[in-house]
């Protein structure tokens, strides 16, 4: 999405450890908290004139205070996919744009509906490996796109960026 706007994208993992997500705190607040930690790390570690950091969490459809982060293994991915199967859930994303000492950040959510997944569908999602590194164990732009639809909010939010980031980037385009 960033390259489509004409920006050169260089991905660099931050060295700082991500703060663990916890039950009992609103998911949007957890995304903001983690994002602020990533902003601090990026300001220490990155010298590029423009840096973007982001964080995404999926909200458990049964418990709005339970985050579904990235599955640690195949079993976690299965559990998350089955939990989301046939349900609606919220995806929370925070994005920050760092330009020198100027930092702007935004937190948004979108609602996604996932079809009821049978065993073959779950297996296909697992085999695709699109669950690796993805909050909730799925990649909307990947294999899960065949079984999910956004019913409220922006696609960018589900893909890991807030729409406000793109509005801002369009304003500062060279």
Image: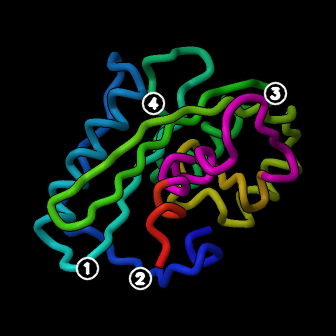
Question: Which of the labelled discs sits on residue 48, or is there none?
Answer: 1
Given contact means CB atoms under 8 Å apart, are the residues at marks 1 and 2 in contact?
A: yes
Establish if 57 lies above or below 11. above
The residue beneath circle 2 is 10
Q: Secondary structure at mark 2?
A: loop
At 41% from the left and 28% from the top, the residue drawn is 28
Please tell me which residue lies in front, 98 or 130: 98
Question: In screen coordinates, is 154 left or right of 93?
Answer: right
Q: Is residue 166 above or below residue 149?
A: below
- Taking 124 as reference, is 80 left or right? left
In reply to whether residue 157 is colored magenta, the answer given is yes
Report, in whole angstroms, how far the alpha carbon at label 2 lies from the one at label 3.
37 Å
Q: How far is mark 4 from mark 3, CA to CA? A: 18 Å
- Secondary element under disc 4, as helix, strand or loop, is strand
Please name the residue that numbered disc 3 is placed on.
86
Chain part drawn in magenta: 145-167
- Marks 3 and 1 in Cβ contact (< 8 Å): no
Judged by depth in the image, the label closer to the viewer, 3 or 1, is 1
Please give the residue where the numbered disc 4 appears in the rendered image. 67
Direction from residue 112 to residue 169 in the image, left or right? left
Foreground disc of the pair 4, 2:
2
The image quarter containing residue 38 is bottom left
CA separation in Å, label 1 and label 4: 32 Å
Q: Label 3: how many residues lie within 10 Å, few (<14), some (14-19) or many (20+)?
A: some
Residue at position x 32%, y 68% in the image: 51
CB contact under 8 Å: marks 4 and 3: no
């Amino acid at each position: 999405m960033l390259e489509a706007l004409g920006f050169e994208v260089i991905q660099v993992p931050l060295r700082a450890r991500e703060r663990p997500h916890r039950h009992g705190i609103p998911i949007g607040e957890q995304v903001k908290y983690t994002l602020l930690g990533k902003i601090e790390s990026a300001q220490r570690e990155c010298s590029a004139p423009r840096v973007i950091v982001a964080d995404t969490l999926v909200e458990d459809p049964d418990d709005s205070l339970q985050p579904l982060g990235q599955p640690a293994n195949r079993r976690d991915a299965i559990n998350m996919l089955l939990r989301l199967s046939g349900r609606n859930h919220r995806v929370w994303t925070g994005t920050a744009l760092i330009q020198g000492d100027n930092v702007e950040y935004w937190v948004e959510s979108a609602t996604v509906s996932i079809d009821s997944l049978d065993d073959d569908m779950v297996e296909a999602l697992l085999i695709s490996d699109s669950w690796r590194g993805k909050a909730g164990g799925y990649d909307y732009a990947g294999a899960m796109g065949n079984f999910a639809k956004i019913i409220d909010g922006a696609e960018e939010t589900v893909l890991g960026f807030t729409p406000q980031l793109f509005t801002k980037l369009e304003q500062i385009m060279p």
